[in-house]
Amino acid sequence: MRNDLAVSVHGLRKRYADVVAVDGLDLEIATGECFGLLGPNGAGKTTTIEICEGLNSADEGDVIVLGRRWATDERELRERLGIQLQETQLAEKLTVAETVRLFRSFYAKGRSIDDVIRLVQLDEKREGRVGKLSGGQKQRLAIACAIVGDPDLLFLDEPTTGLDPQSRRQIWDLVEEFKSTGRTILLTTHYMDEAERLCDRVAIVDHGKVIALGTPRDLIASLGGEQVVEFVLAHAGNGAAELTPESLRGLAGVSAARSRGEDHGTVWELQVAELHRTVPALLAELSRRDLHLAELRTHSATLEDVFVHLTGRQLRDE
Amino acid sequence: MSNIETPRPRRRFPSDSLVQLSSVRFKEFIREPEALFWTFAFPIILAIGLGIAFRNRPPEVVHIAVVGPSPAASRVAAAARADSGLAVEELSADSARVALRTGRVALVVLPQADAQLQYQFDETRPDARNARLLADNAIQRGNGRADVVTVSESHVRERGSRYIDFVIPGLLGMNIMGSSIWGLGYTIVDARRKKLLKRLVATPMSRAEYLVSYLISRIALLVGEVVVLLGFAALFFGVPVRGPILQLAVIVLASVFAFGGLGLLIASRARTIEGASGLMNVTMMPMWVLSGVFFSSENFPRAFQPLIQALPLTATNDALRASMLRGAGWSVIGPEIAILGAWSVATLLLALKWFRWR
């Protein structure tokens, strides 16, 4: 075991009554790293992070956190971890300061209450009741409670789910602030932009397994093209039947092609390295087959595209 | 200065976290207006209502009728009026029958031939039997009967034996039970439902301190509850507190632990408020009826008494009454405290064993 690992998980399995939540998952998170577990709802992210947090038990597998095991060192681990859970509702009748002070009192050492409240930008709400805070403010308070014990390792379970864009950016700033102090973060998310912005490395999780692992940049690069072209045909002409992923792969600069059915018709998707070569070639090919475009879009490839490439499914069902 | 980390100091008592947990619990309670009402105002309103309904009235005047008019009836009526506790009317035979049937009079005296009298009354009604005794006594005396023994009367109205004296300790016991069971049960299940309990056990918080903080805040609130209710009862109804305050405090503390333990036990696994409140009602309802809150538990058959006496609310109420009303000694209070102690230990152990932290 490398002792610069903050978290090391091997062969983790967890089964609930009728579903396998985690199915042989491995993770190695280095100290000082911000690591993201990325995956759709029900992929096993929360189960995995809760086993690492010592809040859930594994059926099989080995979990080492900060060089310690939960079975023997729970007390010490609790002192050194900061945890934000997905669904916690803090006591509504208490004020922000009272809540942070309560959490601070549990730790032998930690940060000052004033510092933490300032850090999460809740100075103005200091004496305000928790029940009166907005969703973003409540989430920042939850993070304040997670960092008030000055943890070496911070767990964030979907920290920005359900928040507006501005609140999300405030949370990101907080995470980056914590990261800049050289400590480790394990976060789960189903937002690709969040993972790309915050995480040094991500593991894409699906059906309880890691299906891809690496830096966001490497994962995107693994698609073979950094750009994505999507198009929808106006109506099925004579040549439509002959339009196959194979035929599109022959076009200049296309590394992958696939189609997926959506409400408004079949969406074709191409992974391309150089837009300026592929788009003219695509247009020429369609015109040769007498096909017309209803939609044509391009975007830089994201982790979403990586997930789609690996699973054939969208990350979020929206 | 050395930069070697100092060893972690031993936890002092009370630790900062215990102080914080208890004060948070206390603040959460006093910021809940409804809870304040049910804990403090409701028992007083109930006490006022019961005090008015069961207040001690001056002795009631008993209404009787004499069937007339006739010289005999007038003589009988005059003799009966010698007793100031009797209100005597002379009525025709028909009106007297109606008055008796409707309960407006308790007794009808019917003068008959040969200077004899007939008493008509419902012998199953206590007030009617009372009227017969009073009327007969007055009429016999008026006709010259002499008492053979000389008696004198001294009227006693003892504080401590009125209904309000009986009911105030019962209300106090009921209030301790309700606020302890609800106060712990509801708050803990609510914290579990909101995943706050799970969040707390994700910190180094001591679980024992978490549970103890509930008892501490409950005891702090209870000082208020007891002072308000007993102060009110003493001031407005003159309900006595004859036993030493220390004894009262011990009884109250023992019952907080017993009911707090029950509350913890009820809350130990329930995930929803609905589930927990069902359990709380099932626990409290039988005790409201059986444990002598509004009427003495002695009214239930002898066969049930061992069970009834073992209930924590019966023990609380009996101990409170013995101490407050009779100033009974520890030999009387002790066994009740022992019952409460047994409940505390049993429920706390089971609650800790079964408690669901996540």
Image (cartoon, coloured by chain):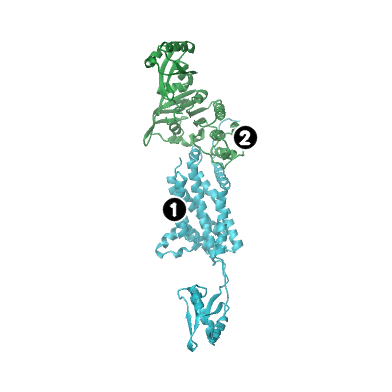
Identify the hue of chain A. green
Q: Position of residue A93 (x, y in %)?
A: 57, 43
Q: Are marks 1 and 2 in contact (CB under 8 Å)?
A: no
Q: Position of residue B317 (x, y in %)?
A: 50, 60
- Above or below — where is B106 with respect to A151? below
Residue drawn at x 50%, y 88% is B115
Residue drawn at x 50%, y 52% is B257
> Dot 2, crowdedness within 10 Å: few (<14), some or many (≥20)?
some
The local secondary structure at tag 2 comes to helix
* Amino acid type at image mark 2: Asp
* Amino acid type at image mark 1: Val
Q: Which residue is mark 1?
A: B282
The quadrant holding residue B228 is bottom right
Residue drawn at x 48%, y 64% is B296
Mark 1 — on which chain does it sit? Answer: B
Q: Position of residue A241 (x, y in %)?
A: 37, 16
Residue drawn at x 48%, y 81% is B119
Chain corresponding to cyan in the figure: B
Q: Which residue is mark 2?
A: A123
